[in-house]
Amino acid sequence: MSSDAVTTSGVEGIRPGRDATTGVHAPPGGGGPRRRREGPEPEPRSYYGQPILNKPVWESPDIPGYFFLGGLAGAGAAIGAAAQLTGRRRLARVSKLGAATAGHLSLVGLIHDLGRRGRFLNMLRVFKVTSPMSVGSWLLAGFVPAATVSAACDVTGFLPAVGALATAGAATLGPPVAAYTGALVADTAVPAWHDGHRLMPLVFAASGVSAAGGLALLAAPIDEVRPARALGAAGALAEVGLSKVMEKRMGMSCRRTSAPP
């Protein structure tokens, strides 16, 4: 039988290890004293010296332009339809032309980043509701033609019934087009992107509304831009506010660390 006795102060006859805590400076709940780390934080690495996460392969300005122009196009189509319903013909025309142009440029940026047009067409062979890229490809495939027909009919005056139908279709698809890229960004293994998946689509949509409102302020007549001005300001405020809330909810994955003094 062992001669060591267990007492209220510990086990008698056992020498404490080198790192044993005295209990004087131990934080509540145990764990020993905490030492301040000196120098930069070590970079987490996996086996064989490889990074844990691969770097994004997106190219600039293709994908950043694709995100921005997609938001502008989607919000612009909705503003164009609303302006037409309220009798603001020139604001409607500017918004429709902006939506069609931005939609085409957004599609060009995506296809250029993919490398070949056939890759975009291959994504249309299936529809996968759990894939933001698949859903987004189908949204663009329906939105860009509708926005183009809507703008062309408005400028030429031909086929007004077809133009009205195309305007309604583009306005219906516009909000998802403006927001789905946020879901696409968040559908990743990068913690700083994935942890914001609940609010990221709303941030992207608000950014699109702000951009579309700004375009209307630049190109539409001053006597028709009051609603677009209000929407642009609201979109900008919503983008900033939602971004702050999103960063706060993301916690450590979005924490900014400063260099030690």
Image (cartoon, rainbow, N blue to C red):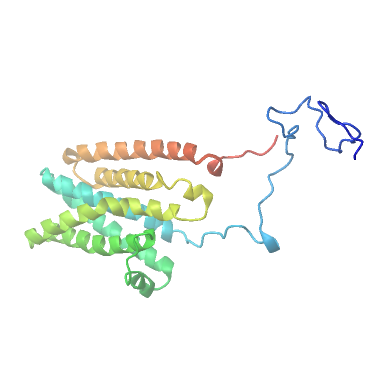
Residue for point 44% across, 55% down: 187
Q: Looking at the image, is 135 positioned above or below residue 88?
A: below
Residue 87 falls in image quadrant: top left
Q: Indicate left or right for 119 with 222 as reference.
A: right
Q: Is residue 74 left or right of residue 257?
A: left
- Which image quadrant: the N terminus? top right
Q: Nearer the viewer, residue 222 or 59?
A: 59
Q: Position of residue 145 (x, y in %)?
A: 22, 64
| Residue at 92% over, 36% down | 3
> Of residues 235 and 38, which is closer to you in this image?
38
Residue 198 in which image quadrant: top left
Instruction: Locate residue 185, reporting x and y percent.
Output: 43, 54
Residue 93 x, y percent position in the rendering: 17, 52
Q: Is residue 174 left or right of residue 180?
A: left
Q: Quadrant of residue 24?
A: top right
Residue drawn where x is 27% and y is 43% of the image: 213
- Judged left or right of residue 96, residue 62 is right
x 19%, y 49%: residue: 80
Q: Position of residue 132 (x, y in %)?
A: 37, 58
